[in-house]
Image (cartoon, rainbow, N blue to C red):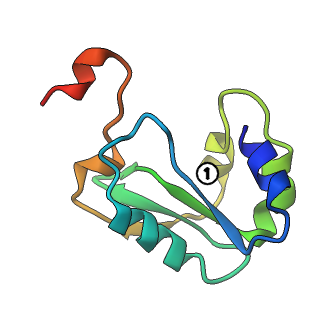
Amino acid sequence: ALAAAVAATAQARGWVVALADMPWLPAGLVRAVALTITTPDAIAAPWRDGRRGHPVGFGAAWRDTLLRLDGDEGARALLKTQAVIRILTEDDGAFRDVDVAGDLEG
């Protein structure tokens, strides 16, 4: 799915990848990630307490790499091997997702 989205937007200067199961993701944080992608080789993501959150932004230089992604792992392996610009946040929305109906409570 990610590779298809990148292929459909080949002329983009970058991509912000957000997960559909994260309804508390604040728009301001999505914007902060997008604005941090100032160079083609940049990768940016929210960070707190040694943990990477979502969304993740990729500069245009990552196009070919993103096009080759396959399966459920998405860009996770790439994020483990590359330097990520850390956007420090205290917002739980960058780390909280919905896996079961009970996750929507509280």
Looking at the image, which residue is at 35% across and 41% down? 23
Q: Extreme left residue here?
A: 106
Q: Residue at x 35, y 34 (%)?
A: 97
Q: Is residue 68 left or right of residue 14?
A: right
The percent coordinates of residue 20 (x first, y second) are: 49, 38
Query: Which residue ends up furthest to the front in the rendered image?
Result: 8
- Residue drawn 29% across the image and 16% down it: 101
Tell me the element at label 1: helix
Q: Is residue 79 left or right of residue 35?
A: right
| Location of residue 43 with respect to 5 vertically, above or below | below
Q: In this view, does 102 lie above or below 41?
A: above
Say which of 87 and 50 sits in front.
87
Q: Decide: few, some or many residues near mark 1? Use Cα within 10 Å; few <14, some 14-19, many ≥20.
A: some
Amino acid type, callout 1: Leu
Percent position of residue 47, x then y:
37, 58
Determine which residue is flagged by label 1: 79
Seen in the picture, residue 39 relative to 88 is either above or below; the reply is below
Query: Is 20 on the left-hand or right-hand side of 3?
Result: left
